[in-house]
Amino acid sequence: MIAVRRFCAVLLAALVTTAAGAQVERQGDSIVFRGRIDDGSVKAFLRLLREAPVRRLVITSGGGLVDPALDMAEAVRDAGLDIEVPASCMSSCANYVFPAARHKRLGRPDAVGWHGNMAHILYLARTGQGAWSAAELADAERLARREQAFYAGLGVDGFVCWFGKIPPHDVPDFYALRPADLERFGIREVEVAATVPPPLPRPDVQMLDLR
């Protein structure tokens, strides 16, 4: 899991705060998730998902660990949840949870940001652009197989998570994509809120336009 870390209540408003500080809250027929994706926060999410009907996930997250993120994404997919991203869904949130949802609504155009996945780590290792221990690479290979199977089940091209990190784009940090460009990779039913809030300082997120 070192390689991964490198990369990187039925009642209304029943609230769970995990040890890492994430908050997972039921609001009506939605689950509101704020914070890091890890074992504790995903367990809280899955518990709320089981306890009463849920239609939508509202998430704000900078990402987290790959295995828990895939567990969460598979649950979102299986439950047929919609997703709303008011401000940011980055890294593992973007890689797995976001594409797993049915209808996807963004509060701002650059709300979802990618900076690579496990296939990207293996690419860096193959091309000599990164060095990991044998144990770290074995873990990366296991996770890459899991994420590949996940993308295949969705009909999504996982290259969406890291193409912007290599030529000709070479984005240094995170990149975001327009809904029309997301469709090229099999991520559909994406809309951006008509009323966009004032821009936040997001120097780490570059908006790519593939037209």
Image (cartoon, rainbow, N blue to C red):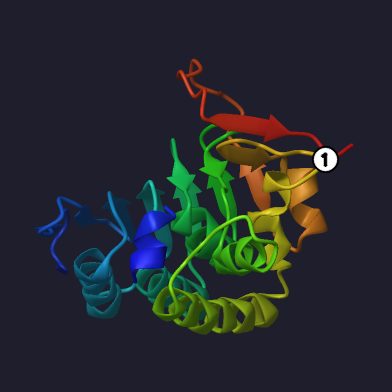
Tell whether 53 sits left or right of 142. left
Could you say which is closer to the camera, residue 190 or residue 28? Answer: 190
Tell whether 46 sits left or right of 72. left
Give percent across and percent down for residue 42: 28, 69
Give percent across and percent down for residue 149: 62, 84
> The C terminus appears in which quarter of the rendering?
top right
Amino acid type at circle 1 is Pro
- Which residue occupies 61% across, 28% down? 194
Q: Is residue 53 something that shows in the picture?
A: yes
- Which residue occupies 56% across, 32% down? 205
- Which residue occupies 70% across, 56% down? 160
Could you say which is closer to the camera, residue 60 or residue 176? Answer: 176
Instruction: Classify mark 1: residues with Cα within 10 Å, few (<14), some (14-19) or many (20+).
Output: few
> The N terminus appears in which quarter of the rendering?
bottom left
Q: Is residue 101 something that shows in the picture?
A: no
> In the picture shown, does residue 167 fall above or below 91?
above
Tell whether 210 sits left or right of 197. right
- Which residue occupies 58% across, 34% down? 110
Residue at which label 1 appears: 168
Residue 196: quarter of image? top right
> In the picture shown, does residue 153 fall above or below 171?
below
Residue 113: quarter of image? top right
Give percent across and percent down for residue 29: 33, 61
Tell whether 88 sits left or right of 116. left
Give percent across and percent down for residue 198: 49, 15
> In the picture shown, does residue 202 fall above or below 24?
above
